[in-house]
Amino acid sequence: MPEVQDIFTAFGEEYRSRHRLSIVQHKAMNAIMNCRTERLGGHLDVCSECGYTRPSYNSCRNRHCPKCQTLAKEKWIDNQKYDLLNVGYFHVVFTVPDILNVLIRFNQQIMYNLLFRTVAETLQELSSDKKYLGATIGFTSVLHTWGQNLCFHPHIHCIVPSGGLTRDMKWKNSRRKFFLPVKVLSRKFRGKFLALLKELKPDTDERLFDEAYRKEWVVYCKPPFKTAACVVEYLGRYTHRVAISNNRILKVENGSVSFRWRDYKDSSKLKVMTISAEEFIRRFLLHILPERFMKIRHYGILGNRNKTKKLTLCKRLTNTVLRVKEKTSALDLIRKFLGRDICKCPACGAERKIRYPLLC
């Protein structure tokens, strides 16, 4: 099946000659084009029993590469499972209206940070209000900038435990079916975002603010998950996802790319979209994040400050089993998601292999 790498290799240089790219976009394109090829070097695996030989090339490890996120995702999930509490978890999504998309695209570092800040303050202020919960919560936020059709659609996913820590250090559960009223979340989010935006960008056209205030901002809250295991699997779907996975790309022919996408405005129907390779690359590059930008952040009782002390207390109050952190090896994680042992020879099944560096 065709991959993003194939599209970049076939059409990338022409695209670069016709469009101006940022440094991080150039780096991402180069990394994806070179990933697991001889250009990055590698090694030769030789079975000591039957002599079977197979070259293995190095990964680029770029966070936007569809090939390099599975192991990173598994490592992150393996580390986060020790922070889960024995309570339900809500999935809350905050989305800004599309009239702000141009402003966000051309001020990514500032606007993405503003989005994170607004979401965090909205959740923390409302949950600390006795009218709703009256407790300090903890949550994980993940930034996504795309929709299923690869168009620019910045939004933040939050995974929130259904409860928090009160001032007298007791655990207080939230209501079973919902965390906070969606309309209250939406209006608080809208007001806070636009107020902070005025402070950061006072020269922004007032008509944009007026139009944004008139819109209803979309905040979505799913019912809580049943088990901690469900939370772990769900987290993995969002934390290390890239704009499009290779398995969604169906074909590349006659300068066009066809891929699967889910149309949420049409009862979530699965459809096929065909666009030019140039347009595909343009859309993909929209989602290259600023260098070193943190797209996964933790807040409240999950934040770095006093996390160990507070989280340990929350685990005790929620009857969560305390487990000692154990580092899982990369080989064990690979065995888990591949379902096979890569140390064994695929030809004879022997476990002994000799590795020789490939000089490229």
Image (cartoon, grey):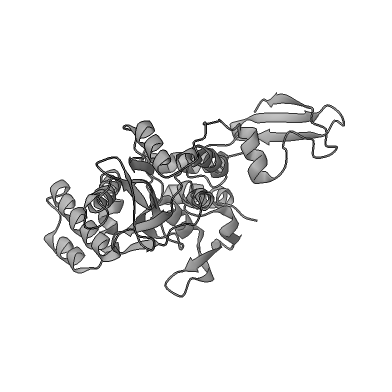
Q: Position of residue 50 (x, y in %)?
A: 87, 32
Res. 231 in view = yes
Task: Say whether residue 37 is visible.
Answer: no
- Front-most of 282 and 69? 69
Question: Which quarter of the image is occupied by the C terminus?
Answer: top right
Q: Nearer the viewer, residue 153 or 24?
A: 153
> Which residue appears at 37% of the width and 57% of the height?
92
In this rendered view, identify the residue nearer to me: 194 or 77.
77
Q: Which of the 4 image quarters holds residue 346? A: top right
Q: Position of residue 36 (x, y in %)?
A: 62, 38
Is 38 on the left or on the right of 165, as rendered?
Answer: right
- Outermost residue toward the bottom? 266
Q: Picture coordinates of residue 38 (x, y %)?
A: 64, 34
Rendering quarter of residue 75: top right
Residue at the image point whose x is 26% and y is 65% from the top: 183
Task: Say if 168 sits above or below 285 in the image.
Answer: above
What residue is drawn where x is 57% and y is 59%? 248
Label count reads 0
Q: For the point 48% across and 46% down, which residue is it?
A: 240
Quadrant assignment for the N terminus: bottom right
- Along the horizontal axis of the image, is 220 left or right of 332? left
Which sits in the foreground, 62 or 310? 310
With 18 as the anchor, is 46 left or right in this view?
A: right
> Looking at the image, which residue sits at the far right?
50
- What is the x, y in percent for residue 319? 45, 43
